[in-house]
Image (cartoon, coloured by chain):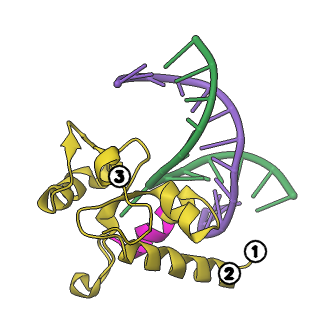
Chain colours: A yellow, B green, C purple
Amino acid sequence: VGVVESAEVARRILACVEIIPRGRVMTYGDVAEYVGDRGPRFVGRVLAENGDGVAGDEENTVPWHRVLRADGHCAPHLYRRQRELLLAEGVPFRGERVVLRECRWDGRSNT
DNA sequence: ATGTTGACACCGG
DNA sequence: TCCGGTGCCAACA
């Protein structure tokens, strides 16, 4: 498993995140399973470099906020911002957590 | 080479 | 449900 392959997997991960419909979400594990390689932690690492705070925010098309933990919690350090973005597109919350049973996306185009 | 770290997940109590 | 421990795995120091 070399560096080149990792870059390729990273590209697939971003491609997956980009097609998550507005108002729907996926967990880190879902994305990892979707691309069929590495694991949830690798997904997090990739988003850390291509998600929030990337140079040229206007150019960033990656909806990183639609990816969250398996228990419905937002990413710890970005919690507030992520919650706002999700609420803004109608994602249902139950307290601090997203109600996954209602908006989890499986990768098939149901939108 | 070895140990630590993290935008995680799963399981048991 | 909530909490801890354990497993994971690439990136880094």
For marks 3 and 2 on the same chain, the one whose residue lies earlier in the sequence: 2
Q: Position of residue A74 (x, y in %)?
A: 32, 50
Q: Give the range drawn in magenta.
A: A44-51
Chain to which mark 2 belongs: A
Q: For residue A97, what is the image quadrant?
A: top left
Mark 1 neighbour class, 10 Å CA radius: few under 14, some 14 to 19, many 20 or more: few
Q: Quadrant of the N terminus of chain A?
A: bottom right
The secondary structure making up most of the magenta span is helix
Task: Tell me the crowding category of disc 2: few under 14, some 14 to 19, or many 20 or more residues within 10 angstroms, Cα based.
Answer: few
Report whether mark 3 lies on the same chain as mark 2: yes
First in residue order: circle 3 vs circle 1: 1
Residue A23 to residue A94: above or below? below
State the image coordinates of residue A81 (x, y, percent, origin top left).
Answer: 20, 58
Taking the image as shown, residue A52 lies to the left or right of residue A26, namely left
Identify the residue under disc 3. Answer: A75
Question: Where is the C terminus of chain A found, in terms of image quarters?
Answer: bottom left
A89 relative to A111 in the view: left or right? left
Q: Which residue is drawn at 32% across and 62% down?
A: A66
Q: Is residue A106 visible?
A: yes
Give the left or right position of residue A79, taking residue A8 as reference. Answer: left
The reply to whether dot 1 and dot 2 touch (C-beta < 8 Å) is yes
Residue underneath mark 1:
A1
Q: The residue tagged with tag 1: helix, strand or loop?
A: loop
Q: Is residue A73 something that shows in the picture?
A: no
Question: Can you give x and y, in whole percent of width and height, for residue A57 in the image?
Answer: 24, 81
- The image quadrant of residue A55 is bottom left
Question: How far separated are the C-alphas under marks 3 and 2?
Answer: 26 Å
Q: Which of the labelled discs sits on residue A5, or is there none?
A: 2
Work out whether disc 1 and disc 2 sit on a shared chain: yes
Spot the residue most to the front: A110
